[in-house]
Amino acid sequence: MFDNILQQIVEGTGGGIGAVLMGYDGIAIDQYFCPVVDADLQLMAVEYANVLKEIRKAAEILDTGVMEEVSIRTERFHVIIRMINQEYFVALTLERDGNVGKGRYLLLRDAAVLREALA
Amino acid sequence: MFDNILQQIVEGTGGGIGAVLMGYDGIAIDQYFCPVVDADLQLMAVEYANVLKEIRKAAEILDTGVMEEVSIRTERFHVIIRMINQEYFVALTLERDGNVGKGRYLLLRDAAVLREALA
């Protein structure tokens, strides 16, 4: 069920290459990757789980309110991470020139569906 | 000189409240804050320096290329971080409903100027 939602997000986003629904402990619940991808997106999500823990800690120290979305652009990829709840997040990886706006929109739209399904 | 550039970025971005030019070691070179701000933006930048070190480490492990831009949205703020070079970054903090697109554009435009000035 989760993989259908993830597939829709990836296929609906121009340049989308994969999405992972994952806990902050780095354990994936579900994932969908485009068939032809030469990057280890699961390893990527595990690494970013560590990053998110740091950001969450920073947000708590700074009292800037709950972290909602993080977007990271590197030379090769664009990763958009949307928090689902206190335990889970979705990481969507796009080609560098992918449609970031569409990806953000689909993540925001489907976050509520994922949140309910996880409850 | 840096504070003029930072001021232009903050004032040119709708909802902009402050910008800091900082090293990954958490030491600020220069900064500009709107007069009426009740958040400790310097502490915020120091915390985010730690986060960036984690992201940079992740990008290296994952071989996804150099990190260029990170954007973090919390309940209260939106922070856009643009890498200047291997040692320095600029963090622009906006109100939650600020003009993120304009902020990203101004950071990208002025990154080259800051890079030259720092060389």
Image: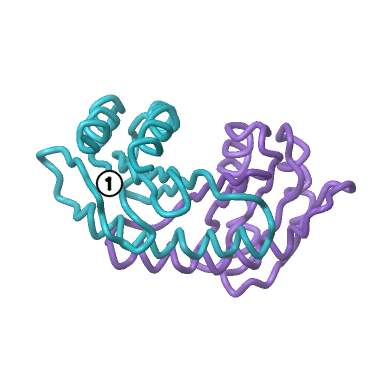
Chain colours: A purple, B cyan
Image location (x, y in percent) of residue A40 = 77, 60
Residue A1 shows in this picture:
no
Q: Measuring 62% from the left and 55% from the top, which residue is drawn there? A: A90
Q: Nearer the viewer, residue A49 or B111?
A: B111
Image location (x, y in percent) of residue B1 = 21, 34
In which quarter of the view is residue B44 placed?
bottom left
In which quarter of the view is residue A88 placed?
bottom right
Q: Residue furthest front?
A: B119
Q: Is residue B113 left or right of residue B65?
A: left
Q: Measuring 71% from the left and 35% from the top, which residue is drawn there? A: A13
Q: Is residue B26 left or right of residue B41?
A: right
Image location (x, y in percent) of residue A33 = 81, 51
Quadrant of the image containing the C terminus of chain A: bottom right
* SS category of the residue bearing label 1: strand
Residue B33 shows in this picture:
yes
Q: Is residue A90 left or right of residue B111?
A: right
Which chain is mark 1 on?
Answer: B
Q: Measuring 23% from the left and 28% from the top, which residue is drawn there? A: B11
Q: Nearer the viewer, residue A111 or B42?
A: B42
Q: Which residue is mark 1?
A: B20
Q: Measuring 60% from the left and 46% from the top, which residue is drawn there? A: A74
Q: Nearer the viewer, residue A114 or A34?
A: A34
Q: Residue furthest bottom?
A: A25
